Amino acid sequence: MGERRTIYLDHAATTPVKPSVADAMWPYLNNHFGNPSSIYRIARESRNAIETARAQVAKALGAEPGEIYFTSGGSESDNWAIKGIAFANRKKGNHIITSAIEHHAILHTCQYLEREGFAVTYIPVDQYGLIDPADLERAITDTTILISIMYANNEIGTIEPVAELGAIARKHKIPFHTDAVQAIGNVPIDVRTQNIDLLSLSAHKFYGPKGCGALYIRKGVKIDNLIHGGGQENRRRAGTENIAAIVGMGKAIELATADIEWHNTHIRTLRDRLLNGILVTIPHARLNGHPEKRLPGNINISFEFIEGESMLLWLDDEGICASTGSACTSGSLEPSHVLLAIGLPHEIAHGSLRLTLGDANTEADVDFVLEVLPKVVSRLREMSPLYKGGKEENSNV
Ligand SMILES: *Cc1c(COP(=O)(O)O)cnc(C)c1O
């Protein structure tokens, strides 16, 4: 018997490290172990490797290398941007604007700052998860010190009008941060033309290692430090650098940017085949997020009369790795804040499935899911007391 087949469709949660990325990292886990802050040759080699990675990240964003600061990942970058700007501008004002559909690394940081005396406006989104730039402009007050709106949503894949939102922030001279963790490698980014002052990214979302990210901080932006200690990262982020991971991230972002067109076409083709197949074979299903303004690999779909969690267990049994938006990791029964923000009723939000495709997925993967998923959905519906009611109401199904 061969090894059990695994079909990985959870690339929004994390991506596998590309072999060439792992190869680039290996020397820095092996004999190139010098502490970059020291003065001998092997330390210089580490230092040079970090600066090469910094240039690679800067190039991918259209930034200067001196504007890139390495962190431990997307969550730290988000925390640093929000808290750092808030505390550095406390004398100017206490008002922060963000959206209702941000990642918890932003939302929970904002809630923490509310307890510290800051005021936060959470801009709502429309049924597709889009922010209306007019809503942003209306929310700005004399005391607004930061605007943070994500580039692309991790659950429903909606891509926000970032350049336009950034232009509004610029007009009002307010720093504009974007959580671009899901966007890198999927959407071309240029911090200059898109009016971005701060940007968070995370290597493990674009085929790099976990526990490594960066914050782009435009030159001249006033921001406090988050991690205090040694003088690393131009005295702005203390701690001995995670050199192997930083080297891996540099390589990964270079590949992700170079491959962006191939990646987009490949993934969008598979995504559309999967999505159309689901919508054609499974009744009472609806796509969440924007039909066009969405990440190429993202499908988020709600099936009426089912629990997302049960669906995941049955799919896992078939070797399919997927995710649900129905409950947060804490195991609470609250549906996802994103699905509620786009107006889904609780019971529909509970039956949501997120499938996110990646570089290594194939047509065979998609066809296997299309074979398995309709059976899983109909078996679960047969077990659901709610569905009987649904059938009576929709006797044509
Ligand atoms: C994954 C993710 C994060 C967190 O990044 P980590 O590197 O896992 O800390 C933040 N924002 C978004 C949109 C994400 O998808």
Image (cartoon, rainbow, N blue to C red):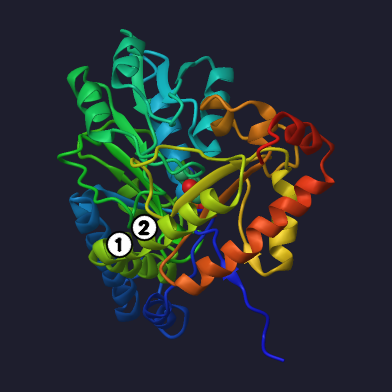
Which residue is at the front of the view, 180 or 386?
386
344 vs 280, nearest the viewer: 280
Q: Residue at x 19, y 49 (%)?
A: 63
Give the number of callouts.
Answer: 2
Q: Residue at x 18, y 19 (%)?
A: 171
In the displayed orientation, state which residue is furthest to the top: 142
Task: Give the quadrant of the N terminus.
Answer: bottom right
Which residue is disc 1 drawn over? 265
Residue 187: give x, y in percent of width and height: 29, 50
In the rendered structure, the answer to whether residue 57 lies left or right of residue 35 reads: left
Q: Is residue 7 above or below residue 148?
A: below
Q: Residue 141 location, x and y as percent?
A: 33, 8
From what the image shows, is residue 146 above or below residue 75? Answer: above
Q: Are marks 1 and 2 in contact (CB under 8 Å)?
A: yes
Q: CA distance from mark 1 to mark 2?
A: 5 Å
Residue 252 in sight here: yes
Q: Answer with the quarter of the image where residue 245 lies.
A: bottom left
Label 2 belongs to which residue? 268
Q: Is residue 251 left or right of residue 305?
A: left
Residue type marked 2: Arg
Q: In the rendering, at what x and y percent does residue 19 appear?
A: 42, 80
Which one is in front, 307 or 252? 307
Which residue corresponds to the image point at 51% horizontal and 66% vertical from the top-left?
A: 366
Q: Residue most toward the bottom?
A: 1
